[in-house]
């Protein structure tokens, strides 16, 4: 997280997507599901996108999602980006 500017909705979404479920005290559901991390991308992609959509809609009501997609940055190394398009 940044030291300042965390009130911006886009920054809040970025912060949410970087959290792993279970690491926030008193908010154990906040964050991405860690069970999806080491699965093959073909299996995990739909679940990751659904999890990210639920996370954003639940914890950042100022954002209205239009589209969400999983993009392979360096797929062989396991690097993926979640791209969320908002209105």
Image (spheres, rainbow, N blue to C red):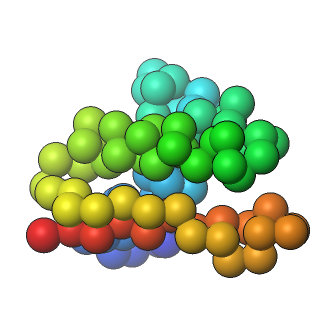
- In percent of width and height, residue 38 lies at 80, 42
Task: Inspect this view and state whether residue 9 appears.
Answer: no
* Drawn side of residue 16 relative to residue 78, left or right: left
Kindly identify the residue that appears in the image at 58 percent across and 49 percent down.
45
Q: Position of residue 4 (x, y in %)?
A: 39, 74
Residue 7 is left or right of residue 25, and the answer is left
- For residue 82, above or below residue 5: above
Q: Quadrant of residue 86?
A: bottom left
Q: Residue 9 sits in which quadrant? A: bottom left
- Based on the displayed image, in which of its 4 quarters is residue 21 positioned? top right
Judged left or right of residue 75, residue 44 is left
Residue 51, image x and y in percent? 45, 39
**Residue 43 % position (x, y):** 67, 41
Q: On the rendered structure, is 36 left or right of 71? A: right
- Residue closer to the observer: 14 or 82: 82
Q: Residue at x 36, y 60 (%)?
A: 68
């Amino acid at each position: 997280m940044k030291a300042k500017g965390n009130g911006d909705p886009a920054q809040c979404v970025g912060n949410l997507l970087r959290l792993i479920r279970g690491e926030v005290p008193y908010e154990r559901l906040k964050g991405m599901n860690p069970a999806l991390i080491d699965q093959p991308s073909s299996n995990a992609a739909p679940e990751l996108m659904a999890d990210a959509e639920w996370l954003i809609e639940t914890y950042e009501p100022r954002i209205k999602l239009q589209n969400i997609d999983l993009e392979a940055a360096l797929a062989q190394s396991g690097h993926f980006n979640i791209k969320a398009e908002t209105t």
